[in-house]
Amino acid sequence: MLDVYIFDERVNQIFVASIDENATISDLIAKCKTERKISEKASLIELYPLENVVYSEDIDFDDKWVDDRQPCLSFDPVNAFVASTLEYSDLPLVSFCLVIAPDDAAGHLSDYSNEQEEMSMVLQNFLRAVEAAKFETDPPSKEITVDNWESEHRGATGRPYHFLGHPIGIYAPIFEDFKVALKTTTPLDSITPKQCELAHALIQEANEIDIENSERRKRIMSIVNQLLGRVAVRILNNDDSSEDGCILVPTGKEKILLVEAAFFDLRPDITVGYKHANLHIAEIARRAWIQDERKHLRNVSCCPSFLIMIAGPFIHVFGIIFAREPTTESFTGFISIEINNHPLEKRIERVVHLFQCLKDSISALELYYWDLTLDQTPMPRARFPDTTSLPLDGHQLEFRRLLLQGDAGRTTPIFLGMFDSKPCVVKFDHTYGIEAHMVLAKEHLAPELFYHTQIYHESF
């Protein structure tokens, strides 16, 4: 059997397919269609060696994508194109990769003038992903998926191109509490008349299109301030840049430094919403956080805050931290508050619940910043989310390397670590039979279980 590494651009992950050494490339592509559940009308599959294209096949069989590419014959066995193998964690790496790309990427590659450059970029991304899997890395987030590795990475995380890596999942107790609270509901009969009035007003204003932007911003922010029980202000950075609004909270014992617990970005239409607002806010946050007066704050904190975007009749909430560069993660996706969506009561209920969760989380962030002690010496905790150790009830767990990256749909990450200086394997599972493991360990049929605990989302 031959292991072929598949780089699926749709979810930005690498998967392994085992095929017979005499299988043809058509067999390989057919296997990928089945195992990766590829829609025949939505994707393009291409096979790359380490130097140049060997084969490409458009799933919808449109010849315009394969003209002039000189694909290899489909009856040739796959191993005829294997030049060498490399060893990563004792697993063979075939010298080519199969890339599954969304259909819009297929259209992008149809411009033959840039074809070699695009193919080279895909190969570089694939090799970066393999290298990242080889060394110690953070597990990928279940909250964020990137459709196109290089072209979309910056838009999805707010980070520059040279800060590539696994999809980022920002871990902070405040953000986790927000996600958990958001999964609950606020029944309509528990909503006060004032909350109902404000939510209805926000829905009305967000759906207004024949209004000047500054007036729209003024009206919406007035309602948002009342929903959050806060006053958002606009501040100018040293370079005269500013956001549409931010909620400031004091920090440190002296309470003389104000920091942003939430940023706001208001757009008239969703077509200029997600990526543009994300990059815009990340840049504004960076300009705020890199100012000299924030240096002692950056030494002790990753500066967590919320990013609240209202683009037309849609609301999108992100988390954002400063980990060398601003890094964002989508928490909600686009929440529709379109006025023509019925029943209106459900829209009001959802708006009230969302802003109540934000209100509670911003209050928690205020307490977090209030308790910070600024320091002139950089602290490890400021390099969030690069956590490499955890204190566990008097024990110390250190992560050494990632053994298995994990797949949000099938498996969770597995790490090699040290538990009180003893080598161990660390797993994070949604469910686990602790008692069954202990019975097996007692009979020496399973390794000793050093430690177990329940964490967020009722997971182990």
Image: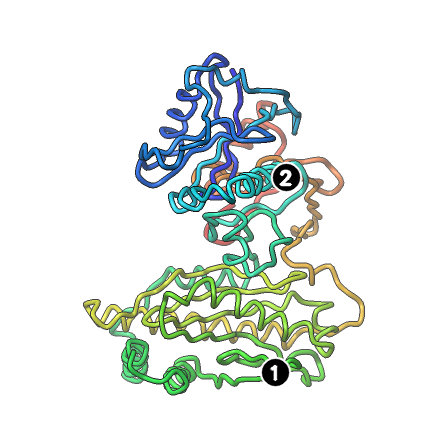
Give coordinates of residue 148: x percent, y percent. 48, 47
How far apart marks 2 and 1 lie (CA) works out to: 43 Å
In the image, residue 41 sits, relative to residue 391, either above or below, namely above
Left or right placement of residue 274 versus residue 282 in this view: left
Colouring scheme applied when the structure was drawn? rainbow
- Front-lying residue, 145 or 51: 51
Name the amino acid, label 2.
Leu
Left or right placement of residue 250 versus residue 271 in this view: right
Q: Residue furthest top?
A: 22
- Front-lying residue, 342 or 273: 273
* Residue occupying image coordinates x 40% and y 45%: 107
Name the amino acid, label 1.
Asp
* Residue occupying image coordinates x 31% and y 66%: 336
In the image, residue 101 sits, relative to residue 257, either above or below, namely above
Frontmost of labels 2 and 1 is 1
In the image, residue 166 sits, relative to residue 292, either above or below, namely above
Give coordinates of residue 3: x percent, y percent. 53, 22
In the image, residue 212 sits, relative to residue 339, either above or below, namely below
Q: Residues within 10 Å of mark 1 (few under 14, many from 20)?
A: few
Question: Which of the 4 image quarters holds residue 374?
Answer: bottom right
> Under tag 2, what secondary structure?
strand
* Residue occupying image coordinates x 41% and y 19%: 74
* Residue occupying image coordinates x 70% and y 45%: 398
Along the polypeptide, which appears first: circle 2 or circle 1?
Answer: 1
Q: Which residue is mark 2?
A: 402
> Under tag 1, what secondary structure?
loop
Give coordinates of residue 401: x percent, y percent. 67, 39
Left or right placement of residue 264 versus residue 355 in this view: right
Give coordinates of residue 243: x percent, y percent. 52, 78
Question: Which of the 4 image quarters holds residue 442?
Answer: top right
Mark number displayed over residue 240? 1
Q: Residues within 10 Å of mark 2 (few under 14, many from 20)?
A: many
